[in-house]
Structure formats: structure tokens, C-alpha cells
Image (cartoon, helix red, strand yellow):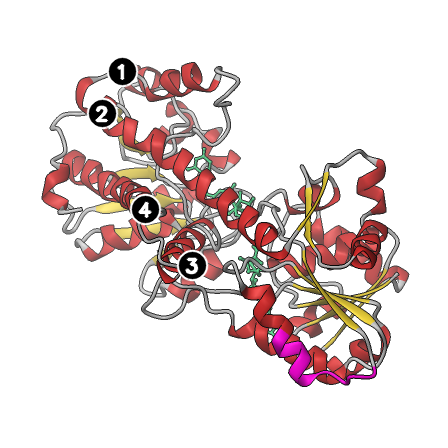
Amino acid sequence: MKISVIGTGYLGATHAACLAELGHDVVGLDTDPLKIESLAAGELPFFEPGLAELLNRHVGTGRLRFTTSYEEVGAWAEVHFLGVGTPQRQGEGSADTSFVEAAVRSLAETITRDALIVGKSTVPVGTTQRLREVLRRHQDPSVEIGLAWNPEFLREGFAVQDTLHPDRIVVGVEDAAHERTLKAVYSAAEEQGVPFIVTDFETAELVKVAANAFLATKISFINALSEITETVGGDIQTLAAGLGLDERIGPKFLRAGLGFGGGCLPKDIRALQARASELGHERSMRFLSEVEDINLRRRERAVFLATAMLGELRGKKVAALGAAFKPNSDDVRDSPALDVAVRLFDAGAEVAVYDPKANFNAARRFPRLRYEESLAAAVADADLILVLTEWDEFKSMSPESLALLTPARKIVDARNVFSGDRWNSAGWEFAALGRKHAPVFDYASLGV
Ligand SMILES: NC(=O)c1ccc[n+]([C@@H]2O[C@H](COP(=O)([O-])OP(=O)(O)OC[C@H]3O[C@@H](n4cnc5c(N)ncnc54)[C@H](O)[C@@H]3O)[C@@H](O)[C@H]2O)c1
Ligand SMILES: O=c1ccn([C@@H]2O[C@H](COP(=O)(O)OP(=O)(O)O[C@H]3O[C@H](CO)[C@@H](O)[C@H](O)[C@H]3O)[C@@H](O)[C@H]2O)c(=O)[nH]1
């Protein structure tokens, strides 16, 4: 099929390359000419495992092309997927849907053949109905343009795998013909037996934000319990294992530590609260503000542990290992790791940051921190080391191997990747989030 993907960021570039892998003819479109230039040359402007290879292969086969021209895709494609951003509105919790509206308007004004527009961006419930109006106002009435919503559930770091082998495909449609078109697009997944849920616009929109709200809640639930184990003792990871073995609960998303960040969970729980309030259901989603507070307290806790171990931060040298919001990604949007590094810097510490892939993005966002090109350089003169993102390179460190690179003998494990006993017995002062550490942290002092 002839398919366009509008917006070629993390979601759109992945979707475009995977559709080409599935045998479709694909054109990716973005309003950012630099991004398009790079993608057209087969170069991925961000890091995502396995994606550069796919991009390169299909730019090579000619099945994947890139453009900035709406006229070109409007005259050519049968299906247009929307993957443009829906960031948090400045100073508010709600989602900014203006990019989606602009993309639909541009398509409406340039589509010259019958086609289906399929939204993949994460949007507040009610958006698709609103977009129908935008379409109606701007399209050529002699062409038939359908609208469907097909939210995306991929995780960064696993984007290719999640796109080619999703847990489920959800489509919101109002016309059986649109369902048939989407089944043709995703015929490979259907053959693999991937569940295909066909529903209305509202349910499709809500499944997506509900999934992210649930995942965020699960993480904050275990992190809230870790506040208890920090005070009374007990092991948060054994607790999580004991909890997760209940098949009704499941073991995933119970990794206690520095909490969630990224371009999705934080903004999506705020947008869901904002939309619920607009709809007169402020109370229904109010618990999500607690989920967020718990999440932010993890960062305070990491700074507290660093301060407790160093006596005071001013003038101390701290190595921050990790800047990305999760391993196998160079994304620093709302990154807990980078936030902790900045908080330590603001409190007077000299902070050296090292991330295997995210240094560049982190430096663009916070140029005042010092960035090092290797683990060895970051820890070379450190008084304290914090593991803030659980990259394999950091997880594979041992007390002995690290001791060869640094004078520091103090480490904070903010992602619960090490055994404290092992580090203690090798002579290190060790602290981890979720485990008991004196003095006890006074959460009330935060006022949240
Ligand atoms: N990143 C993920 O893992 C992920 C997963 C699932 C869903 N989502 C959702 O997908 C959407 C996109 O997220 P992202 O992380 O890919 O964002 P992103 O910022 O990486 O990419 C968005 C792209 O859209 C382009 N764009 C903006 N306006 C445009 C327009 N009018 N026409 C064409 N292009 C335009 C931007 O230049 C940018 O390249 C969001 O709604 C997000 O919540 C993201
Ligand atoms: O047990 C866990 C699991 C995750 N995290 C953190 O949670 C954040 C989000 O992780 P993850 O969900 O794996 O990454 P994303 O790529 O942001 O993916 C989420 O957001 C996407 C965008 O909406 C959705 O498509 C995905 O389904 C959803 O998992 C990261 O900071 C992780 O470190 C934890 O702290 N503990």
C-alpha cells in the first residue's frame, strides 16, 4: 500500500521504517527540513536500537522516502498516519493538540485522491471528533477522506520490536471500510495472531492514556512502598517480587528506583487529569497528582542520599552516571537522571555527567553541567558516584573494577541494580533508593 507518515520523530520515523519492512511503500513527512534531510540520507537523528539498520535498508530499497511536501503525499498516499507531537501546553497540564490540528488541515488542503487519515499520536479524548470538523472545513468535497484513530504503544529502546510485534492493535473507526483498510495495513500482525481491537474513537483515545496512567501508577505504587522500607528496613526488590508473582498483579513495572520520566508518562498523566477536569471529573483522576508527587520525591531522595553521604554538596565532586530517562535511549525529555544531576549542581556540587548515548541531548538542554566522554573520565576525580540510568555499562561495574578508576568509595544506586552487601564488603559506602539508610529522610519537609 502507499502510505505516508506525518511527523518523523521517535514515533513516526519508527512507524515509517517498520511499515517499509512490512512491504509497504512509505513516504515520511516532517516540517523540520533538517530532520528530513538526515532521514533521506539514511541517517537516524536519534538513537534507537535496530532502527538505523531498518532505515538504511529501506532508503536503499527505495521503499522508504522522505519529504517536506504535503502536496506530494496528498496526491500519492492511500493512508496517512499522524505521528506529530502532542506536548504539554506551556504552564498547564493539558496536551497541546495544535500540531495534530495543523497536520490534519495541511492534509485536508492537499489530498487530491480518496484516502484515510489515521491518528497515532497520543491525544485527549474527544480530539478525533474535533478533527473531523477540521477536515470537513478544509477538504475538497469531491474527494472522500476518512478518519480513524490507532494509538501507538511502543516503548523507546524497544521501538522496532514493539512496532513489528505489538501486544495489541487498537483502532477507533466509524466505518467498516476503514477497519478493512487498517487490517490490510497490519495484515502481518494479524497473521501473527496479534489481538486487533476495533472500537469507537473515544475508547481508542482513552485506551492509550489509560495504559500510560496505569503504568505510571504501578511504578509510583512500588516507589511509595519503598519510602516505607527506607524507614523500617526490608528489601523493596524482594517485596516487588513477592507482589509480582501474584498473576493478577504481574512482575512488570514494579522496578523501584528513581521513578518514571520521558516524553510520555509524565505529560500523559498530566493531560489525562486536565481532560478529566474539563469534563467535570476532576476527582476521578485526582489520584494521578499523588502518583506524580511520589515520582518527584524519588529525585529528592537521591539528592538527600548524596548530601547525607558527603556531609555537604558545596565544592564536592559528583559523577552522575546516566542522563537518559531510561537505558538504550538518548531521550532526555523529563529525565529523572538529568534532573538529579541539575539539582546536585544547583546545590553547589561539581557534577560530571556521562551517558553512553544522551550526552549530546543533555548538553543541549543543560549546557552548564560538565559532560565527559567516558565512564573513566567522569569518575576520575569524584568524591561520590550516582548510578541514575541503568545502562548495561554501569550495571556491569563491580566495586573492584570501579575502584581502579576513581578515588571515590561512595556510591548511590538510584536504580537498584547492585547488591549493597557486595559493595559494602569491598569497602564502599553504599546507599540505594528503597533501602534503609540513616538518617531517615523527612518527607514532610518537602511539603508535597
Ligand atoms: N516517543 C514514543 O515512544 C511514543 C510512543 C507512543 C506514542 N507517542 C506519541 O506520539 C506523538 C509523537 O511523539 P514523538 O516522541 O515521536 O515526538 P517527536 O517530538 O519526536 O516528533 C514529532 C515530530 O512531528 C513533527 N511535526 C510537528 N508538527 C508537524 C506538522 N504540522 N507536520 C508534519 N510534522 C510535524 C516535528 O517536527 C517532529 O519531528 C506524541 O503524541 C506522543 O505522545 C510517542
Ligand atoms: O518498573 C519500572 C519501569 C519503568 N520505569 C521508568 O518509567 C519510565 C518509562 O519507561 P517505559 O514505559 O519503558 O518507556 P517509554 O518509552 O516512555 O514508554 C511508555 O510511554 C510510551 C509513549 O506513550 C508508550 O507507548 C509505552 O507503552 C509506555 O511504556 C522510564 O523512566 C523508566 O526508567 C521505572 O522506574 N520502573
Quarter-of-image position of residue 217: top left
Quarter-of-image position of residue 348: bottom left
Say if 185 sits above or below 215 in the image. Answer: below
Disc 2 on helix, strand or loop? Answer: helix
Quadrant (top left/top right/bottom left/bottom right) for the N terminus: bottom right
Disc 1 on helix, strand or loop? Answer: loop
Residue at 62% x, 57% y is 201
Q: Which residues are magenta?
A: 133-142
- Picture mark count: 4
Q: Amino acid at mark 1?
A: Gly
Image check: 367 left or right of 62? left
Marks 3/4: CA–CA distance: 23 Å
Mark 2 near mark 1, Cβ–Cβ under 8 Å? yes
Q: Nearer the viewer, mark 4 or mark 1?
A: 4
Disc 4 on helix, strand or loop? Answer: helix
Is 334 one of the magenta-colored residues? no
